[in-house]
Image (cartoon, rainbow, N blue to C red):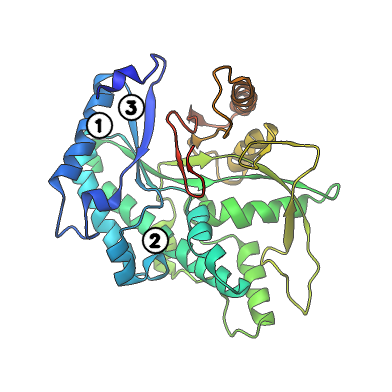
Amino acid sequence: TKLERYFIPQLNHYRFSISWSRVLPTGSPDKISKDGIQYYKNLIDELLANGITPFVTIFHFDDVQSLFEKTGGWTDESIVEYFADYARVLFKELGPRVKFWTTINELNIYCEETFYIKATELNTAYTIRYKCVHNLLKAHARAYHIYNNEFRSSQGGQVGLIVHGSHHIPKIANDSESSKIAFNFETGWIMHPIFSKSGDYPEVMKKRIAENSRAEGLTQSRLPQFSPVWIEYIKGSADYLGLNHYLTHMVEPLPKIGGRWFDDSGLNKSYNSHWKFTMSGFSIVPEGIGAVLRKIRDEYNNPPVYILENGMAEKAEYNDFKRISYLYSFMREMLLAIRDGCDVRAYTIWSLFDNLEWYSGFT
């Protein structure tokens, strides 16, 4: 099917993801699917023929089941090298046609949705979640350095990763500290190891998780530690930041019960009842996207940002006024952030086509 029948003339880039199992059925480069590779080559060629830049995501939540069963998934460090091998295959086979690579989509959300919500005890859930992100950050850095050392000079592309970044408004007036903590536990958790001058996880995150871990009688923090070698290896391992933004929360401090916080952040999240919401239950607060962009500008030396997801779920209608209003208001706030010096390079609507939502099927 020719893609030009689907695309509007103003479209200049298109983001899509590669299915790991479609390219490497076992998850290992020992068996490469020629048909799988050709499928993506055809797609990329068709995009380029229509003047559309491919924006390729290497991993967007779809694991190889046999590999997951073999390694235990992202809670086991052995999967890091499997991912590195997978990325190398893609760089070699598709790299000459691709200038923008995103290694992993929303590390924080993937680890929460895959492991965190399935655990029966909260402290166990957090432990698993932290291990998952820890290994995904290592996998991202491995892919980045493989591209940097083996392919960048001949292909001239860029490699980044995507973080889910919500905005957090203090529920109590002038409680800016809660907003800062919430940012660090969601967005800074992923960004700080890569984009900060010091690397590693945010200090407030390390401190609070260690404190809660001690209160649970543990001898060490549930948050894994990076070795000095890994801190340096991960630091700076991105040419750009991919930002997905959907919602805003209210945040307020939680009291300790039995010497510990219910949530490691020590915060409670809620919504303002006066806000409007999408069909997915996401709050519609356009100012949030601008606030997140300015926070990234101030905290992490204003890296190039590609907004790779922003949009709303709504009933299918020919006169889609709600969605038009939503997109207009969020893009307006993005433009105001650009006016304020935020280095935003692109804006991507989620989604051009009907989308497979993880809990709702096709929407």
Q: Which residue is mark 3?
A: 53
Badge number at residue 150: none
Q: Amino acid at mark 2?
A: Lys
Q: Report how far apart the C-alphas of labels 1 and 2 lie in the structure.
A: 29 Å
Judged left or right of residue 72, residue 128 is right
Which residue occupies the foreground of this view, 272 or 154?
A: 272
What percent of the width, then of the height, locates residue 199?
50, 58
Badge number at residue 138: 2
Which residue occupies the foreground of this view, 335 or 79?
A: 79
Q: Amino acid at mark 1?
A: Leu
At 63% from the left edge and 37% from the top edge, which residue is drawn? 279
What percent of the width, then of the height, locates residue 285?
70, 35
Which residue occupies the foreground of this view, 276 or 140?
A: 276
Judging from the image, what secondary structure is the residue with disc 2 in? helix
Asked whether the residues under the numbered discs 3 and 2 touch, taking CB atoms below 8 Å apart as contact, a structural biologist would say no
Judging from the image, what secondary structure is the residue with disc 3 in? strand
